[in-house]
Image (spheres, rainbow, N blue to C red):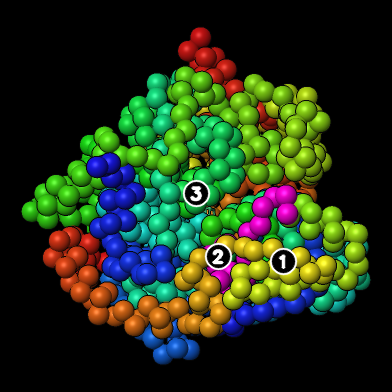
Amino acid sequence: MKSFKQHTGLVAPIDRANVDTDMIIPKQFLKSIKRSGFGPNLFDELRYLDEGHPDQDNSQRPLNMDFSLNQPRFKGASILLARENFGCGSSREHAPWALDDYGFRAIIAPSFADIFYNNCFKNGLLPIVLSKDIVDSLFLALAENEGYELLIDLEQQCIVLPDGTSLSFEIDAFYKQCLLEGLDEIGLTLQDKESISAFEQQWRKDSPWLFDVL
Amino acid sequence: MAGKTLYDKLWDSHLVKQREDGSALLYIDRHLLHEVTSPQAFEGLRLAGRKPWRIDANLATADHNVPTTTSERAGGIAAISDSVARIQVQTLDDNCEAFGISEYKMNDAGQGIVHVIGPEQGATLPGMTVVCGDSHTATHGALGALAHGIGTSEVEHVLASQCLVAKKMKNMLVRVDGELGIGVTAKDVVLAVIARLGTAGGTGYAIEFGGDVFRTMSMEGRMTVCNMAIEAGARVGMVAVDDITLDYVKGRKFAPTGELWERAVANWQTLHSDDNAVFDAVIELRGEDIQPQVSWGTSPEMVLPVSALVPDPEQMDDPVKREGATRALSYMGLKAGQPLTDIKLDRVFIGSCTNSRIEDLRAAAAVARGRKVAANVKQVLIVPGSQAVKAQAEAEQLDQIFIDAGMEWREPGCSMCLAMNADKLGAGEHCASTSNRNFEGRQGNGGRTHLVGPAMAAAAAVTGHFVDVRELMSNETA
Ligand code: SF4
């Protein structure tokens, strides 16, 4: 997995609460059996004026110029600023895959849906929770300043604003480590192979009806 | 010392290792797979040269994008007209074959929506940890299991290690005491709970549903309730084990028998929260207060009793809520102050892992019997949750009631719940749907979903607009 240590990037807004995973990547694109290539269809229904389907030449489609990511000033953004409950809905990991494929490295919001939040870490994407007030002020600053960039330092758990102010954020120690080192979580778990086998053996004795039935 | 909640007990019994950084390894008993969220996980295993840890813990089925018309299904995979869907269904078969995983293939007698067939086949049992790459996995919590949705990387992780890296959630009790009125169903209860909690109110919690209403509710009703825990933000929804649970499980295909059954039951009877257990949050509702519900917006929390009026965003204090409601009304083509019963329907969908079990179909059939689909309703889809549900419904001749009413009787699958196959809404169409999500575009680009229970959906189908199903019921007795 890609590691995440420090990142400086342009910020783009998506100014609505409860952005669900259907909105992030509509279902017609879930039929791919690959992990990559979802970027051009990120926020498909908001981004384009026509109805999207797989195997389309996206460069020929009419853009919704009211949508933030289509505006020239947010071109190349790698940090997404969002509202409450971002990523709610389905468990589809295609959502973080699409955000990653588009070029986002971090998402800042007052809250995230649980499954989406988890899925981000498996894909080198950093979800950052900040208080509603701070997020409000970032939306304001972003609206007023073209080329608004932030520096995110995961090691220090802080975000540095253009004026030098530093905002700290909380993050789970395990996830932080995985992201900093770009760790393969499965490899890490399998280092505990013996504990898993020992547990399983005992469990089989205690609850034999759970084994060998399928 | 404080007692343990049901969630605490299930967590503790499956804890392989508590790590110093606060994360834990949790052992997974049952892993359910389907065609949409598994291909990349199998690919990951192959690339890393890994094998599944325990083959017999896994069960797969094709449900999300299988066609539901009898003619298209009859031709098998080769006849699936959507080429991308065909590849996914084929890929699942190939992967299960290659790794030796049990699968109910598209036209097998055990096939169905993954959350319908798990309990139905006894493949998910009380006391289990159950995961699946689908957010409605909490459905299995109705059995007194710890069940939740996971992403594709976690699907791969569970396949490879039989464990999940997890963090313990907080405990929430949703308590509904009293009695439900006639015509008020499990779906109405859970929608009323979501209206109270909000779509994110349960984030970070495992919810246990307790109180008189759930104690007397059937297993299928409990599944409907647990199914929608995620729509309140909670990954886990659960109901404690009681005699209703045991009666349901007994005799199912993969349930234990004989001496093992006795041992299992002794164990399962401990699966309830202790009297002195402490919950981090408690929400209480009264059964008598709950009316048949209809969602009016684009989030499951935007739901009201059928007798209500479409709310006015101008009267909402929170600016984010106001903005959300305004946007929802414009998307849904509704006006503040309009009665919900004025909403005319273009299509009706009865199905999904929320409401496609036999009791749901019976409830819908009771309303449809002897009536006809209203002229303004273009299509009514009845999609049974599994082959077994379909067979049972046909044995009870429910299919004939639906067909006589002018409704379509389909083959099992997710169908218009997420509209990955041909079953979908056109732009601007209003649909009364027994599914679980009313997000923008969920049932088709521009489609307008209203979440309801199965009897309410059938009532909407025959009257052409929303109606309190109890009015149709009293006509019958009059
Ligand atoms: S019926 Fe709908 S919610 Fe249930 S598993 Fe299928 S797509 Fe998911």
Q: Is residue A58 visible?
A: no
- For badge 1, the amino acid type reads Ser
Residue A16 in the image: above or below residue A36: above
Element type at mark 1: strand
How many residues crowd around disc 3 within 10 Å: few (fewer than 14), some, or many (20 or more)?
A: many
Query: Which residue bears the numbered disc 1?
Result: A166
Quadrant assignment, res B48? bottom left
Query: Which residue bears the numbered disc 3?
Result: B234
Residue B453 in the image: above or below residue B82: above
Residue B399 - label: none
Q: Is residue B40 visible?
A: yes
The CA distance from mark 3 to mark 2 is: 20 Å
Query: Which residue bears the numbered disc 2?
Result: A171
B158 to the left or right of B200: left
Protein chain holding label 2: A
Protein chain holding label 1: A
Write the residue at 30% across / 39% down.
Answer: B277
Query: Which stretch appears magenta?
Result: A116-134
Label 2 CB-ligand 1 distance < 8 A = no
Write the residue at 64% across / 21% down.
Answer: B307
Task: Give percent across and percent down for residue B66.
Answer: 54, 63
Element type at mark 2: loop
Of tags 1 and 2, the one toward the viewer is 1
Task: Give percent across and percent down for residue B315.
Answer: 78, 28
Taking depth in this image into account, of A63 and A132 the one nearest to the observer is: A132
Residue B31 drawn in magenta: no
